[in-house]
Structures are given as C-alpha cells and as structure tokens.
Amino acid sequence: MDEQKKISPNIKEGQFRLEKIKSEIEQLNLEKIKLEIEQLHLEELNLDKQFELEKEKLAHIKLMNVKQFQLDKVKLIYQGILTALGVISFIVILMLI
C-alpha cells in the first residue's frame, strides 16, 4: 500500500509535467508560426521595395534615353547646318574663281 501511495502522486506529478510540457510545446509552435508569418511579411515588403526600386530605375533609364535622343537630334541639326554652310562656302568659292 505504501508503494501504491507513493506511485500515485508520482503518476499525477508526471502527468502534470507532461501536460505542462505539451502546453509549452504548443506555445513554442504558436511562436514559431507567428515568426514565420512575420518573416513572410518582411519578405513581401522586401519584394515590394525591390519592385519600386526597379520601377524607379526603369523610369530613370527612360528619361536618360529621351535626353540622349534629344541630344543626338540637336547634334544632327548642328551637323546639318555646318554641312550646309560648308556647301554654300564651297559654291561661293567656285563662283568667285
């Protein structure tokens, strides 16, 4: 009987510890899930930020291409003017000869 009295509280204590461990495991699982959700949210924010940076980069490239096109256009106009002046000068020189 004495052994049974000692065993019974030990069993109850073991069951209590087991329940406590199960509860702690559930808490840890919940914390793990919360951390995973937070990590996914941060990854989503990171992807959004990268997308915005790519959009800004493409807008900048487009602007630079437009400016380069305008610069090339001006260069061609001046080159045309200089060529026309050269031809006119050549014709004037030929007429004077």
Image: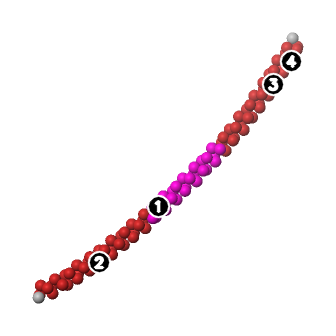
Closer to the camera: disc 4 or disc 3? Answer: 3
Dominant secondary-structure state across the stretch colored magenta: helix
| Residues packed near mark 2 inside 10 Å, few (<14), some (14 to 19) or many (20 plus) | few
> Sequence-wise, which precedes: disc 3 or disc 2?
2
Pointer 3: what residue?
Answer: 84
Residue drawn 29% across the image and 77% down it: 19
Closer to the camera: disc 1 or disc 3? Answer: 1
Residue drawn 75% across the image and 34% down it: 74
- Could you tell me how far apart the alpha carbons at marks 1 and 3 are, in whole angstroms? 65 Å
- Could you tell me how far apart the alpha carbons at marks 3 and 2 are, in whole angstroms? 97 Å
- Could you tell me how far apart the alpha carbons at marks 4 and 3 are, in whole angstroms? 12 Å
Say what amino acid the circle numbered 1 marks: Leu
Pointer 2: what residue?
Answer: 19
Say what amino acid the circle numbered 2 marks: Glu
Residue 92's mark?
4
- Residue 38 belongs to magenta span: yes
Q: Regarding mark 1 in the picture, which secondary structure is present there?
A: helix
Pointer 1: what residue?
Answer: 40
Residue 24 image point, x, y percent: 33, 73
